[in-house]
Amino acid sequence: MREEEEEAEKKRQEKRDKKKQKEEELRKQGKLLSKKQREQQAKNEAYRKQLEEAGVVPKREEKEKDDDDDDDDGKELTPEEAEAKAKKKMSKSQMKKEEQERKERRRKAAEERERLRLEAEKAKEEAERRA
């Protein structure tokens, strides 16, 4: 009788330990949330959706179930996709630097377009004078 009780107690303890271990793992993954945390998360998500609809922030791409880091599936990434993927792993200072470099590239491209437009205008005027 006593042995059966001890064995039953041992099984209950193992079950409790297994449950605690599972909860700890979920907590580390950020999947085990309290009621208050779930409410806050839902509130934040609703706010983000409002911002996305207003165009204030870019739309978030939904994560796939496989959670692969290499989810290229044999496709080439567009420059925008590559930049977005790289930004996920950057620190704030790196992102700031990338943003400044991107703005500088855009500024230079705009200057180049303007220079070419002026050259084309001058060439057109020159051709009109000759004719």
Image: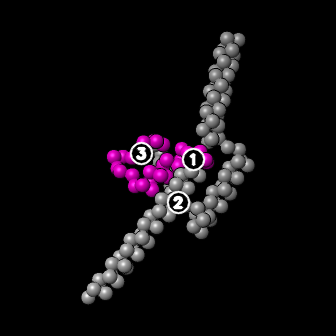
Q: Quadrant of the C terminus?
A: bottom left
Instruction: Identify which amino acid the numbered label 3 is placed on.
Output: Asp
The residue under the point 63% across, 41% down is: 30
Q: Nearer the viewer, residue 42 or 117?
A: 117
First in sequence: mark 3 vs mark 1: 3
Instruction: From the image, state whether disc 1 or disc 2 is nearer to you.
Output: 2
Q: Quadrant of the N terminus?
A: top right
Please tell me which residue lies in front, 60 or 106. Answer: 106
| Circle 2 or circle 3, nearest the eye | 2
Residue receiving disc 1: 94
* Upstream in sequence: badge 2 or badge 3: 3
x, y percent for residue 5: 69, 16
Q: Is residue 62 visible?
A: no
Whether residue 24 sits left or right of residue 67 in the image: it is right
Q: Which residues are magenta?
A: 67-95
Label 3, label 1: how many angstroms apart (C-alpha)? 23 Å
Residue at the spot 34% in from the left edge and 83% down from the top edge: 125
CA–CA distance in space, label 2 to label 3: 28 Å
Mark 2: secondary structure: helix
Identify residue for label 3. Answer: 71
